[in-house]
Image (spheres, rainbow, N blue to C red):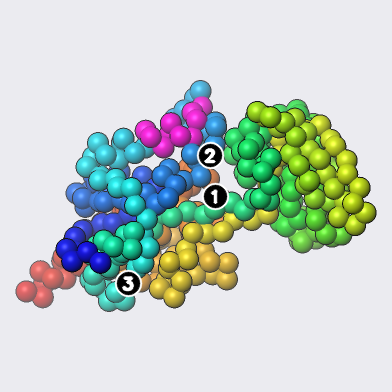
Amino acid sequence: MSEKIERLKTLIIGSGPAGYTAAIYAARADLKPVMYTGMEPGGQLTTTTEVDNFPGYPEGIDGPTMMVQLQQQAERFGTEVRIGMVTAVDFSDKVGGIHKVTVDDSKVIEAETVIISTGATAKYLGLPSEERLKGGGVSACAVCDGFFYKKQDVAIVGAGDTAAEEASYLANICNKVTMLVRKDHMRASKAMQHRVNSLPNIEVLYNTEVDEVLGEQVVEGLRMVNNQTGAKEDIAITGLFIAIGHKPNTDIFKGKLEMDETGYLITKGKSTKTSVPGVFASGDVQDKEYRQAVTAAGTGCMAALDAERYLATIETEAEVAS
């Protein structure tokens, strides 16, 4: 363990739209933020080929380029971006307390405020063909990428409310949506099931799973298997959407911060304040409803403002006390 301990005003854990936006605002507020990117610098958008729904890009932009530009903007205002993984935290439960964070199991950092932007990881099926075609027609976000498959045939995997909502969204813009449900029933609410069943261009296939995604560079089809009979069938599609859930990247915060039953960090009211003073959460790590780049960026802004106001309050109280 390193003996030298670094002291910071603001530490940002995780990159992506939330982390970089927090960094931009924190740096402009002279909080001298330091960011640790984690194992996937740029977050989920680095696996997205085209971003067409972020304001300010009339021609669209590819995800990796957007993340590079956000990093450059954050660095222009003085953010120090470091490659590294936060492996342990020791948060103080006192207002004005100092939070200790360990990076890569060796370096210890003390921070007056911490902004968590570690995001969430989409769950995939784990098929080699699926992994190969990520960004080439395999997506975990229909709202993000569905536009590119307008008037085409697509498929979606999932049985919950999110899958039903995304299937309904796709049905409004695509020619046909084939919905694969692993069991003999859907987990979605009755209202969402009724919506799916009311749309004529959605075909729901029960007891059906993906055997292989077809295509070399882009998705060209899908080989499905009935898990009751073993029968296989190929269909022609250009897009495959996986809607089987997300896992928030919050394992290191278990027992340290208040979470919901699925591991998302709980924030207070309309703020980004967590259950610990001086620790704030932004982006998908605390948002399981919207999960969009623009909403993540918005909460990143909020987290930096919350951190700035928190520090100002601590300083004012210290001046009064002296």
Q: Which amino acid type is shown beneath numbered disc 1?
A: Arg
Question: Which residue is denoted by mark 1 in the rendering?
Answer: 291
Q: Position of residue 5 (x, y in %)?
A: 19, 64
The quadrant holding residue 177 is top right
Question: Which residue is denoted by mark 2 in the rendering?
Answer: 47
Question: Which residue is denoted by mark 3 in the rendering?
Answer: 90
Range shown magenta: 60-69
The residue under the point 51% across, 23% down is: 59
Nearer to us of marks 3 and 1 is 3
Q: Residues within 10 Å of mark 3 (few under 14, many from 20)?
A: few
Which quadrant holds the C terminus? bottom left
Nearer to us of marks 2 and 1 is 2
Q: Which amino acid type is shown beneath numbered disc 2?
A: Thr
Badge 2 or badge 3: first in the primary sequence = 2
**Secondary structure category for the residue under label 3:** strand
Dot 3 and dot 1 residues touching (CB under 8 Å): no
**Secondary structure category for the residue under label 1:** loop
Query: Disc number at residue 51?
Result: none
Q: Is residue 160 left or right of residue 263?
A: right
The quadrant holding residue 221 is top right
Queried whether the magenta region covers residue 185, the answer comes back as no
